[in-house]
Amino acid sequence: MIERRGLMLGGSGVLLAQSVQAQGPAAPALPYRAHSVATPDGVTVQAYEYGNPRGPAIFFIHGYMQAGMSWERQVSDPQMLRDFRMVTYDMRGHGMSDKPVGDQFYKTNKAWGDEVAAVIRATGLNRPVLVGWSYGGRLMGDYLTHHGHAALAGMSYVAAISSSADPSRFGPGGRFGGPAGSGSADPATAIRNTVGFLRACFEVQPSAEDFETILAFNMMVPRHARLSLLGRPGIYDEQLRALDIPVLVTQGVKDQLVMPSMAQHTAAMARQSRLSMYENIGHSPFWEDAARFNRELSEFVKAAQR
């Protein structure tokens, strides 16, 4: 006889008690709806849905070595939660998504464009605004190349790469990357350079607690993914010139990774563009000045979805 929660259990009751013990405690409630998304090349990526299921859709795409958690100051904002349906995700090689080994999973522009399309399709986003930060701008360009813009309401480039053609558009913070930096085979060297890279991502530095979290999800990206992501050509001028949807270009003036000239180039290529420059802000305006960023993005999305 086994006593559980004040009840005497015997016979089949013993099996029931053992079953309850085997299952363990119930999982905690999560602030998002989770989606596991299979891409056409067999990679499974994790997506996270927040906010109002009936609101205008926003799809946030993070940058190099980052994660869907990068957008915490957007997906936890009460007004944005009330007004919008928001989806973030961990791109392949990052966060909780698959981290396959092999350049074929990371060097092919079509694989990235198809990945973005797969998340849009699996989560049922209707005419979303794509928001791409840093390397996420490249994924938006890959999506445009292989899927066009007919299914989108608008695009938001946030300190984002729209062309790899001109090295002068990249800042000194890039020195922390590569095989001798954050992609080093030596863990101490990789960690030290990842810290340097993250410091370069912010002019207004995060709190110590926030920095620990950001460093933790950066270190979830394995060395093979860090290196395979580098050196992939991507020039999207033709795709930007073809856009007939609104484009918001957001840029920190003190960015150490993607120079303001990149944002100016993006705005010049897209006909229906608006350029928003943030003084005294670095590579992460959505984090460093979240109040302004959220306000401007909300206004842009509402106008684009009309």
Image: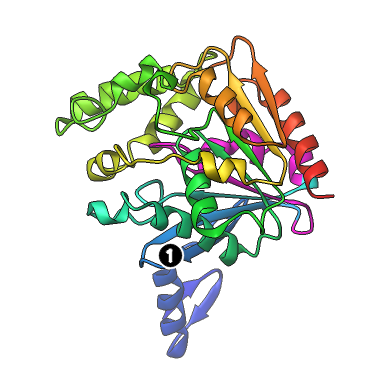
Q: Is residue 10 visible?
A: yes
Q: Inspect the image, locate mark 1, and give the three-letter code of the amino acid beneath it.
A: Thr
Q: Residue at x 61, y 41 (%)?
A: 241
Quarter of the view holding residue 6: bottom right
Place of residue 26 in the rendered image (x, y in percent of width and height, measured from the top left): 52, 62
Q: Residue at x 63, y 33 (%)?
A: 73
Residue 131 vs residue 84, the one in the foreground: 131
Vertical position of residue 62 compared to residue 260: above or below: below
Q: Residue at x 23, y 54 (%)?
A: 101
In the rendered image, residue 214 lying in the magenta stretch gets the answer: no
* Mark 1, other Cα within 10 Å: few <14 / some 14–19 / many ≥20: some
Residue 179 vs residue 44, the one in the foreground: 179
Q: Is residue 26 visible?
A: no
Vertical position of residue 80 compared to residue 262: above or below: below
In the drawing, does residue 57 fall left or right of residue 218? right
Q: Residue at x 25, y 39 (%)?
A: 227
Vertical position of residue 41 compared to residue 269: above or below: below
Residue 33 vs residue 198, the one in the foreground: 198
In the drawing, does residue 269 fall left or right of residue 216? right
Place of residue 255 in the rendered image (x, y in percent of width and height, measured from the top left): 50, 17
Farthest residue, direction left: 186
Which residue in the structure is indicated by mark 1?
A: 39
Element assignment for label 1: loop
Farthest residue, direction right: 306
In the rendered image, which quarter contains the N terminus?
A: bottom left
Residue 268 vs residue 26, the one in the foreground: 268
Span colored in magenta? 53-81
In the rendered image, residue 80 lying in the magenta stretch gets the answer: yes
Place of residue 269 in the rendered image (x, y in percent of width and height, measured from the top left): 60, 33
